[in-house]
Image: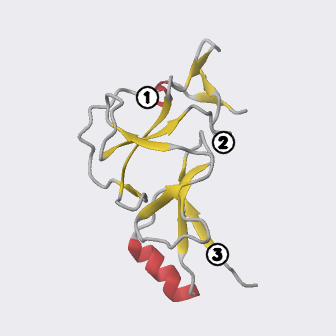
């Protein structure tokens, strides 16, 4: 058996892990970012040079914005997904305790994760707390969700 690619999703891998896999298997780990509510939104698919520590580029079907707590573009802020047009890989809404459904947001879905774009359009997860005063996301208030 041989591997052509190695992919990872979940918490961003630190450069040391990527280096150990490279040394042991001769392959670069391609990191991806997504949530339970979505498919992968950002990543390092084949054909893109992996930058250690980078989440990668927005993947097809997702328009990613970095916003502060007042929905303004920010150098560092919350990872948000544009809802128009609605991405196919994003769940519909959250089910509330009374069995009704709460929308994800008016114009963006706020992930609760903090990142920043670099000069080349790659997203980098922020290791430091954000300075934006974020409003609570819908996700923090609900435990059930509904897929397409």
Seen in the image, is 141 located left or right of residue 40?
Answer: left
Chain-order first, disc 2 or disc 1: 2
Alpha carbon distance from label 2 to label 1 = 19 Å
Task: Check disc 3 and report the residue beneath it.
Answer: 5
Classify 81 as above or below 105.
below
Seen in the image, is 82 located left or right of residue 127?
Answer: right
Where is residue 25? Give x, y as percent: 58, 86
Contact, mark 2 vs mark 1 (Cβ under 8 Å) = no
Pointer 1 local density, CA inside 10 Å: few below 14, some 14–19, many at least 20:
some
Alpha carbon distance from label 3 to label 1 = 35 Å
Task: Check disc 2 and report the residue beneath it.
Answer: 89
Classify 139 as above or below 33.
above
Q: Which of marks 2 and 1 is in front?
A: 2
Classify 50 as above or below 128.
below
Give me the residue at 61% from left, 26% from top: 93
Give me the residue at 61% from left, 33% from top: 85
Seen in the image, is 72 located left or right of residue 137?
Answer: left
Q: Which of 109/120 is in front?
A: 120
Residue extending farthest to the right is 1
Give me the residue at 66% from left, 42% from top: 89
Give the quarter of the figure containing the N terminus.
bottom right
Classify 68 as above or below 97.
below
Any mark on residue 137, and which?
A: 1
Where is residue 138? Give x, y as percent: 48, 26
Contact, mark 3 vs mark 1 (Cβ under 8 Å) = no
């Amino acid at each position: 058996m041989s591997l052509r690619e190695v992919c990872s999703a979940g918490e961003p891998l630190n450069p040391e892990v990527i280096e150990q896999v490279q040394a042991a298997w001769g392959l670069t780990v391609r990191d991806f970012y997504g949530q339970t509510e979505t498919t992968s939104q950002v990543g390092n698919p084949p054909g893109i040079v992996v930058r250690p520590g980078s989440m990668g580029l927005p993947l097809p079907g997702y328009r990613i914005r970095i916003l502060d707590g007042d929905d303004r573009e920010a150098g560092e802020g919350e990872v948000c997904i544009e809802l128009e047009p609605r991405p196919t890989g994003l769940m519909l809404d959250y089910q509330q305790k009374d069995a009704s459904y709460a929308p994800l947001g008016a114009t963006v879905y706020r992930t609760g994760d903090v990142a920043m774009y670099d000069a080349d359009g790659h997203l980098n997860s922020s290791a430091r707390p954000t300075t934006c005063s974020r409003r609570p996301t819908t996700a923090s208030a609900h435990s059930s969700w509904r897929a397409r």
